[in-house]
Amino acid sequence: MPKFDANLSLLFTELPFLDRFEAAADSGFAGVEFQFPYAFDRHAIAERLERHDLVPVLHNLPAGNWEAGERGIACHPDRIGEFQDGVGRAIEYATTFGCRQLNCLAGIAPAGAEADTVRETFVANLRFAAARLKDAGIRLLVEPINTFDIPGFQLNRTAQALALLDEVGSDNLFIQYDVYHMQRMEGELANTLERQLPRIAHIQIADTPGRHEPGSGEINYAWLFHHIDRIGYTGWIGCEYLPAAGTHAGLGWMKALAG
């Protein structure tokens, strides 16, 4: 059976953030991930993780002003210093509570920026982050995201991510493969997972349409979970979906599809 972790940015949102750790543990999750922990005291997060015996699987590097619509700054040529400062802050959080993977969101290119400059900036920032994180014992991930949900997102297909890994040339840079995003952009889920497994460090899931629970849409998750086991993936699978009718009401999919 795959090893699922709860994304506390999308699940258990009926509760304040710090109370979601207990809810995840009570629901049978052994691990958690979250998008951005920076609005909360890192020691408070560490205390909740320890209290409820939860593994901190993943969180993102700072991604600019999320509330204003920014979706990452790694490709922004005029914000390299801010990006580098964010890497340091992310390491500070991750090392406080023992998180060993951080995801970097590419972002949307700023208006008027030259495409070559945007890519060169992204590559240089990834080299910087991969090296800093390696020194801290943390893996760096990049995530292709569909352009229906985030128009203009700079990294949106698996082939782009693979080419990016080759160009950066770090042994500490991997792909975060989100099944929902890649179903929307390209399909070919099973073959991609199997072929690129050595370069995939983390998997996330949601169904489509709607980004709701597995089993609510078009993806054959019962088959896919078996396939993920068969090809030998032993990492965590992040449940990063929008519950259709409350988190607890929708958790039956785990037993039905992966039990």
Image (cartoon, rainbow, N blue to C red):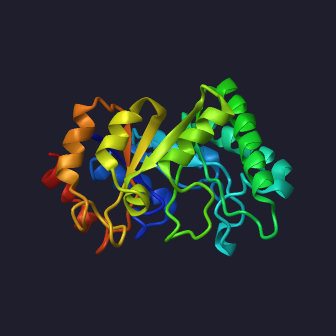
Residue 20, horizontal then vertical, whole percent: 43, 58
Residue 39, horizontal then vertical, whole percent: 65, 59
Q: Quadrant of the N terminus?
A: top left
Q: Is residue 221 above or below residue 247?
A: above
Please give the name of the residue rendered at 50% of the width and 53% of the height, measured from the top-left corner: 157
Please give the name of the residue rendered at 76% of the width and 40% of the height, measured from the top-left corner: 124
Closest to the observer, 157 or 233: 157
Residue 159, horizontal then vertical, whole percent: 51, 45
Q: Is residue 248 left or right of residue 178?
A: left
Closest to the observer, 130 or 60: 130
Q: Is residue 48 left or right of residue 237?
A: right
Q: Is residue 219 visible?
A: yes
Closest to the observer, 97 or 184: 184
Residue 210 quadrant: bottom left
Closest to the observer, 240 or 41: 240
Q: Quadrant of the C terminus?
A: top left
Residue 195, horizontal then vertical, whole percent: 37, 34
**Tally of numbered tags:** 0
Please give the name of the residue rendered at 77% of the width and 57% of the height, measured from the top-left corner: 76
Q: Is residue 45 visible?
A: no
Please give the name of the residue rendered at 72% of the width and 61% of the height, measured from the top-left corner: 64
Q: Is residue 170 above or below residue 90?
A: above
Residue 55 quadrant: top left
Q: Is residue 1 left or right of residue 108?
A: left
